[in-house]
């Protein structure tokens, strides 16, 4: 069976991708994750859903020799999906050097290993955060990236440039996938986002407010020039995001790529406001949320959503799940966490 190496395989999107890869029954999946933002329990959750075991090497990707030993031990890797990165926008502002060190060194080391061990298919997690504040919506892959708003976003934008330059001189074929706002959980409710630190993203804040872990949540800004005054994002189900990686990997494996380096937006194409997201959650869960409208959050863009038609045309990928399914799976996962958390 072909082997895929996922970096960040015990993380949120990596674990959902591992589940979808195992479900295909065509791939063996191994992971490199140092557990800086995830837990080893994820391996058991993946096993309970798929019946398959993902070996996770608890290795820091910044350590080139340690990464090389994983490749030496696994000579049958046919593709790498590089999820591992630090991803908090706020933390990246207070610790820019830590973010640049972790995200760049990890990327460079994994690319070096792909080159050295002749692994020719590589997928990179990029982000809509590279676009920053833009006037013309929806965003296409050609939308100009002007100034990234945070060191985190810069690691994604510069990461893309590093890969692009590398592809000019390498046989490794690379795809960068720019995710919009991945949310939700596996439909079983048995795998979702492990929130290790204080949650700051909307959906974990909503579900934690619903179970009372957060007494009252704040909607950041009610005076935006949008249809209900709250900010608009393109939420996309994590399983749809996972599925895009399978399609992108197959596209590379089948040699369908036109260029050695290609970039795709992954969004639903639908803008959803914060209040619309809250309403969807209340509808599917039957729980009334305790929230107030507060000040705008520094650094937030007003509105952003994607044009993902390129991914549809080239990869044959399109978002399948709507905001109700995102919220109901997130809610199932929150209840699973509640039941399995010792008090
Ligand atoms: P996550 O934090 O859940 O997973 C990332 C994993 O990488 C974690 O398990 C962490 O322990 C691991 N990791 C980080 N640095 C490492 C290192 N030096 N060595 C080994 N392991 C390391 O994040 P996620 O939400 O699953 O995101 C996956 C990728 O997608 C990231 O690159 C992120 O920047 C990108 N992305 C995420 C979102 C989002 O909203 N979740 C949106 C756009 C892009
Ligand atoms: C969504 C909306 C908030 C919490 C982040 C990263 C971005 C990308 C995706 C990685 C905003 C509002 C939130 C709360 C609220 N990640 N909100 N109350 O900021 O769009 O994007 O995740 O690449 O880089 O920045 O996502 O979930 O934090 O916020 O009103 O308690 O919900 O203001 O309008 P964001 P988010």
Image (tube, helix red, strand yellow):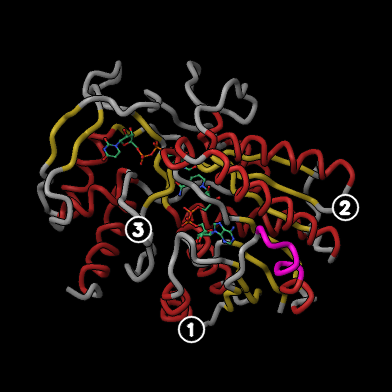
Residue 153 location in percent, x, y? Answer: 54, 35
Residue at x 21%, y 41% (from the top left corner): 278
Q: Which residue is mark 1?
A: 51
Q: Nearer the viewer, mark 3 or mark 2?
A: 3
Q: Is residue 154 visible?
A: yes
Q: Residues within 10 Å of mark 1 (few under 14, many from 20)?
A: few
Q: Nearer the viewer, mark 3 or mark 1?
A: 3
Relative to residue 125, is residue 227 depicted above or below? above
Q: Which residue is mark 2?
A: 171
Residue 57 location in percent, x, y? Answer: 60, 74
Q: Nearer the viewer, mark 2 or mark 1?
A: 2
Cα–Cα span, label 3 and label 2: 38 Å
Q: Residues within 10 Å of mark 3 (few under 14, many from 20)?
A: some
Q: Earlier in the sequence, mark 3 or mark 2?
A: 2
Relative to residue 283, is residue 76 depicted above or below? below
Relative to residue 339, is residue 230 depicted above or below? above
Magenta region, residue range: 62-68
Q: Is residue 168 left or right of residue 191?
A: right
Q: Is residue 11 left or right of residue 340?
A: right
Q: Earlier in the sequence, mark 2 or mark 1?
A: 1
Q: Is residue 316 visible?
A: no
Relative to residue 219, is residue 239 depicted above or below? below
Residue at x 56%, y 66% (from the top left corner): 33
Are the two marked residues, 2 and 1, in contact with CB atoms closer than 8 angstroms? no
Q: State the SS at label 1.
A: loop
Residue 171 location in percent, x, y? Answer: 88, 52
Residue at x 70%, y 69% (from the top left corner): 66
- Residue 149 lies in magenta, yes or no? no
Q: Earlier in the sequence, mark 3 or mark 1?
A: 1
The quarter of the image holding the N terminus is bottom right
Residue 236 location in percent, x, y? Answer: 43, 46
């Amino acid at each position: 069976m072909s082997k895929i190496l996922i970096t960040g395989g015990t993380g949120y999107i990596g674990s959902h991708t591992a589940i979808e890869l195992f479900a295909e029954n065509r791939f063996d999946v191994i992971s490199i994750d140092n557990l800086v933002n995830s837990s080893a329990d994820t391996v058991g959750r993946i096993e309970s859903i798929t019946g398959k075991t993902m070996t996770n090497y608890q290795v820091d990707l910044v350590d080139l020799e340690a990464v090389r030993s994983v490749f030496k031990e696994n000579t049958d890797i046919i593709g790498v999906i590089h999820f591992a990165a630090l991803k908090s926008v706020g933390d990246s502002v207070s610790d820019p050097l830590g973010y640049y060190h972790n995200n760049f060194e990890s990327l460079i080391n994994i690319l070096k290993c792909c080159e050295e061990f002749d692994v020719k298919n590589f997928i990179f997690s990029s982000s809509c955060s590279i676009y920053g504040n833009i006037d013309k919506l929806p965003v296409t892959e050609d939308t100009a990236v002007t100034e990234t708003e945070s060191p985190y976003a810069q690691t994604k934008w510069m990461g893309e440039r590093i890969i692009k330059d590398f592809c000019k001189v390498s046989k490794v074929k690379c795809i960068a996938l720019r995710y919009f706002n991945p949310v939700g959980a596996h439909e079983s409710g048995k795998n979702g986002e492990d929130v290790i630190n204080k949650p700051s993203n909307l959906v974990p804040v909503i579900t934690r407010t619903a179970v009372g872990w957060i007494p009252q949540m704040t909607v950041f800004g009610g005076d935006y020039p949008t249809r209900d005054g709250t900010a608009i994002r393109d939420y996309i189900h994590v399983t749809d995001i996972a599925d895009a990686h399978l399609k992108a990997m197959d596209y590379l494996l089948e040699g369908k790529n036109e260029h050695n380096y290609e970039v795709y937006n992954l969004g639903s194409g639908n803008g959803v406001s914060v209040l619309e997201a809250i309403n969807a959650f209340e509808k599917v869960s039957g729980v009334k949320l305790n929230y107030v409208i507060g000040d705008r959050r520094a650094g937030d863009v007003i509105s952003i959503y994607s044009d993902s038609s390129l991914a549809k045309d080239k990869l044959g990928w399109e978002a399948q799940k709507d905001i109700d399914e995102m919220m109901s799976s997130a809610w199932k996962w929150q209840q699973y966490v509640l039941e399995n958390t010792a008090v």
